[in-house]
Amino acid sequence: MFVKICGITREEDALLAVAMGADAVGFVFAPSKRQIAPSVPRDKTKRLPPHTLTVGVFRD
């Protein structure tokens, strides 16, 4: 089973998601209450294990 947790806005949440077994963490770039600036994920993923996948949610 592959688990992705989306809507990450804080580094602590990304670390917790991975510690609890998530394979990937997602960041929302489309307008929403969880939207973050494009530069933010770089800062939020520095401490994640190298095997962790990161994904983005965009709007067409």
Image (cartoon, rainbow, N blue to C red):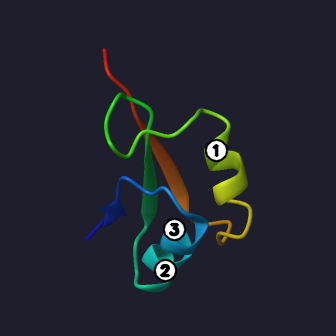
Report x, y in % for residue 8. 44, 57
Q: Mark 2 or mark 1, which has the lower sequence index? A: 2
Q: Which mark is residue 40?
A: 1
Label 1 element class: helix
User: In which quarter of the view is residue 38 placed?
Assistant: top right
CB within 8 Å, label 2 to label 3: yes
Residue sitting at 49 percent across and 76 percent down? 18
Report x, y in % for residue 12. 56, 74
Disc 2 packing (10 Å; few <14; some 14–19; many ≥20): few
User: In which quarter of the view is residue 58 placed?
Assistant: top left
Q: Is residue 44 above or below residue 42?
A: below
Residue that carries the numbered disc 2 in the rendered image? 16
How far separated are the C-alphas under marks 2 and 1? 18 Å
Residue that carries the numbered disc 3 in the rendered image? 14
Report x, y in % for residue 55. 46, 45
Q: Nearer the viewer, mark 2 or mark 1?
A: 1
Label 2 element class: helix
Q: Is residue 25 above or below residue 55?
A: below
Which amino acid type is marked by label 3? Ala
Say left or right for 13 vs 59.
right
Say left or right for 56 vs 5.
right
Q: Which mark is residue 4?
A: none
